[in-house]
Every structure is written in structure tokens, then in C-alpha cells.
Amino acid sequence: MDTADAVVIGGGVIGTAAAYYLSETGRKVTLIERNGIAAGTSSRCEGFILVNDKMPGYDARLGRLSQSLFPGLSEEIGFDIEWSPQGSLLLIESEEEMAVAEDFCGRLAAEGLAVQMLDRRRIHEIEPHLAEDIVGGMETATDGAVNPMALAQGLARAAQQRGAAIRTGAAVRDIRLTSPGKVDRIITDGPDILTPTVVNAAGIGAPEIGRMVGVEIPITPRQGQILVTERTFGLTRRKVMEFGYLMTKFEKEGYRRRVTPEMEANGVAFVLEPTGAGNFLIGSSRRFAGFDTATDPTVIRAIGERAVRFYPALARARLIRTYAGLRPYTPDHFPIISPTPVDGFFVAAGHEGNGITLSLITGKLTTQMIAGESPDIDLKPLRLDRFDSEIAHAR
Ligand SMILES: Cc1cc2nc3c(=O)[nH]c(=O)nc-3n(C[C@H](O)[C@H](O)[C@H](O)COP(=O)(O)OP(=O)(O)OC[C@H]3O[C@@H](n4cnc5c(N)ncnc54)[C@H](O)[C@@H]3O)c2cc1C
């Protein structure tokens, strides 16, 4: 039997960030992961660190808090997370979108975010390969990207250097409680672990872990597919996405993009990420398909067509691979960073399409919550009990 002050379940970007910040407090931390570090959604995604897709208000503040922790991280942990700070562009397709985008941009700017609108002339000046009919853009100077696998690996290694134990290839099978509903021990494939504190950072596996202690966690896998091109130079060096992506992400009522039925049915919206190696990641789709991580020719074709609509030259880029990942979706799109009715059992999961961006602030907030310190931002909107009535209703 091992012992730990805290056990983190899950070796994705969220679990490794939690282990990194928790181990800074001098606690004896064990991270337990059933496969390898970043073997789940954190290696089946893109690496944008964005505030340009956050709703003005709490969402944007949370994103910006996390984003501000990235520029110095490689140096802090002595591991290159491939932080690339070129900013991001949202592309605007129509005058109707332009009006919505101007309002959105104004509200983000009023909160002090580094955003600005670009008119038709300016957007084509800085992005000469764009389709001619694109009417404008929104630029966010602080946005960037990382390599999510390097991020998780680097955080795990840094946690280990602070004394954390990283156990991979070992699944959590059960969690035992003392009789008054307090965490007591974790039953694993390897030695069991006696601990008073558990952080459930198991991503789409979080509901299963919750059920071990009778806590319901409303997280559902939401699939997204990605195309990878061969090394393709000269097209753009920025992270680019269509403004309509926001409409898809937040299922904006009454807004219709001019897209094919396949794009509409599969939530296809254009996202382009140049990688450090010169390849492009092209995304993406959003659909509920259970735990299926197979890619689908209809969706892949729709993503490709959507990309060519914005950058016609992409029609000549060769694809080298496709993959699908499962976003840990919650009904209100916010993550769950929260205590639960079980004493010592905490949740840090449900980041949907924002887990890479929000990883660092999640690690910090989780640590502050466990240590009883005042959090960097109000945790009320992230509490699990905000879903109490939905969970009761579903029973
Ligand atoms: C196509 C796509 C594109 C995306 N692009 C972006 C982006 O550009 N920017 C962004 O911010 N976010 C993006 N995301 C979202 C982001 O990838 C996720 O929010 C994030 O990876 C979730 O991290 P996680 O650590 O919660 O989950 P995971 O990475 O899935 O980690 C959870 C881990 O828990 C482990 N686990 C589960 N059950 C057990 C058990 N019983 N015992 C032990 N271990 C267990 C799993 O093996 C897994 O490794 C994207 C997602 C997709 C699908």
C-alpha cells in the first residue's frame, strides 16, 4: 500500500497541470494514468491558447488568466512546450457576421483584451492567400499555441522533479470511502494508495470515476476531427479560424452560415493551425458520437471543402493523416473545478474545446481550492452543484 497527500487521476493536460501546481505546495502527490501521459484527448486535438473565442465576461477573464501563464512556462519548467505567440485571426465571411463581430470585439476590448477589427483591405494585406470575398477579420495579439503533448510531458516531468510520483499504465479501479463519506483509498491495477484527497482529472472518463463514489458528473464526449497536411510553407504563419466557428461552438440561435448540409450536421467550422514543423492542422467538427475516435470520410471531406473556401491554395496541399478526439463537453460549456459532496473528492474536468488553453489556470485553481486559499477567480460558476437540478431531472 502506497500513501499520498493527494492523488490526481488522469495524465492529460489538466491532470499534469494539477500535479505540477499541487506539488509546489510541498504535498506528496501521485498522478495515476491508465495509458501514457497525454494519451487521451490531449494528443487528439489542436494546441491553440485562445481568448478570441471566449465570451466577454467571466469566460474571457478565465481564458486570459490562463493564457498569461504560458509565455514563461518553458523556462519555468525547463522543457520546451513550443509556445508560439503569433496572435490569431478570426475571418469574417459576410456583412452580417461583421456586425456581430464588431459588437463582440468591442466588448472584449472594453475588458482590456488586445483585440482589434481588420477591414477588408487590411485583412487581405496581411493574409494575401485568403479567398477574395472575405470581408474582414478580428485580430487577438495575445493568442498563441503550444504543442499539447509537450505541455503535458513537461508538466509531468516538472511535477516529478518536485517530488510527485507519476504512475502510468495503471488504471484506477475503485475508490473506497470511510463510512461518513470521506475519501480513504484508491484501488488501482498496481499498489493501492491511501490518501485523503483525490482530483478527478480523467476528462471524458470523469463520470466513470465519479460513479465510484456516487457522484454524478455531466460530461459527454463531443467528437472533433482534424486533417494534417504535409509540410506546406508560405500560406500563413498565424492561427486562423472562421468567425462562424464561435456561432457553432455556442450554438447561436437564429444564426445560419452558408454551408452544406454535411457541414451543418457535423458542426464543421474552419480552423487552421501551422505547427512548428511546417505542417498544418485543419479542423474541425463537433458532434456527439459516443466514444468513437474513428474519422469519417464525409466529415473529412466537409472539413477540407470548408478550408478551401477560406484558403483556395489548400486544395493543392496533400494530407498525411487524419484523427479524431473527444472533447469533454458540459451542458454550459464551462469546466467543472469543484469540491463534491464526498469529502476529499474534487473534480477538474469538462473543458470541452478549451482544455489546452485553460490547463494552467485549472491546475492553479485546483491547488488553491484544495489548499483552502483564496482563488485567482471566483469558482462559483465552475462548481459541480450548478448542475444539481439537471442531474435530478435526468434521474
Ligand atoms: C479536435 C479537437 C481540437 C481541440 N483543439 C483545442 C485547442 O486548440 N485548444 C484548446 O484549448 N483545447 C482544444 N481541444 C480541447 C482539449 O483537447 C481538451 O479539452 C483537453 O485535452 C482535455 O484534457 P484532459 O486532461 O481533461 O483530458 P485527457 O487528455 O483525455 O486526459 C484524461 C486522462 O485520464 C485518463 N483516465 C481516464 N480514466 C482513467 C482511469 N480509470 N484510471 C486512470 N486514468 C484514467 C485517460 O487515459 C486520459 O489520459 C480540442 C479538442 C479536440 C477533440
Image (cartoon, rainbow, N blue to C red):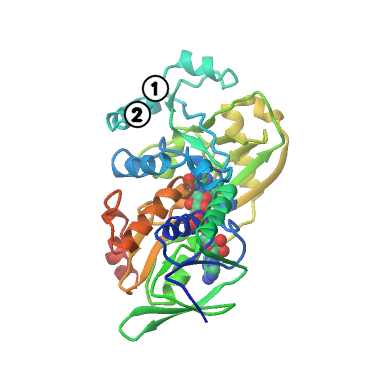
Asked if the residues shown at circle 2 and circle 1 are in contact, with their CB atoms under 8 angstroms apart, the answer is: yes
Residue assigned mark 2: 105
- The relative height of residue 88 versus residue 218 in the rendered view (above or below) is above
Measuring from the top left, give residue 332's x and y in whole percent: 35, 53
- The relative height of residue 367 versus residue 50 in the rendered view (above or below) is below
Q: Amino acid at mark 2?
A: Cys
In the visual, does 251 lie left or right of 307? left
In the visual, does 254 lie left or right of 171? left
Which residue is nearer to you in this view: 11 or 131? 11
Which residue is nearer to you in this view: 33 or 316? 33
Mark 2 or mark 1, earlier in chain:
2
> In what element is the residue under mark 1?
strand
The quarter of the displayed image where residue 219 is located: bottom left
Q: How would you rate the neighbour count of disc 2 (Cα within 10 Å): few for under 14, some for 14-19, many for 20 or more?
A: many
Residue assigned mark 1: 117
Answer yes or no: disc 2 within 8 Å of ligand 1.
Answer: no
- The residue sitting at 52% across, 38% down in the picture is 145
Q: Amino acid at mark 1?
A: Met
- The relative height of residue 81 versus residue 337 in the rendered view (above or below) is above
Measuring from the top left, give residue 224's x and y in whole percent: 55, 49
In the visual, does 89 lie left or right of 168? left
> In what element is the residue under mark 2?
helix
The quarter of the displayed image where residue 281 is located: top right
Measuring from the top left, give residue 55's x and y in whole percent: 34, 40
- The residue sitting at 45% across, 50% down in the picture is 359
Measuring from the top left, give residue 156's x and y in whole percent: 54, 56
- The residue sitting at 49% across, 47% down in the picture is 356
Which residue is nearer to you in this view: 262 or 12? 12
The quarter of the displayed image where residue 284 is located: top right
Q: Quadrant of the C terminus?
A: bottom left
| Residue 256 visible somewhere in the drawing | yes
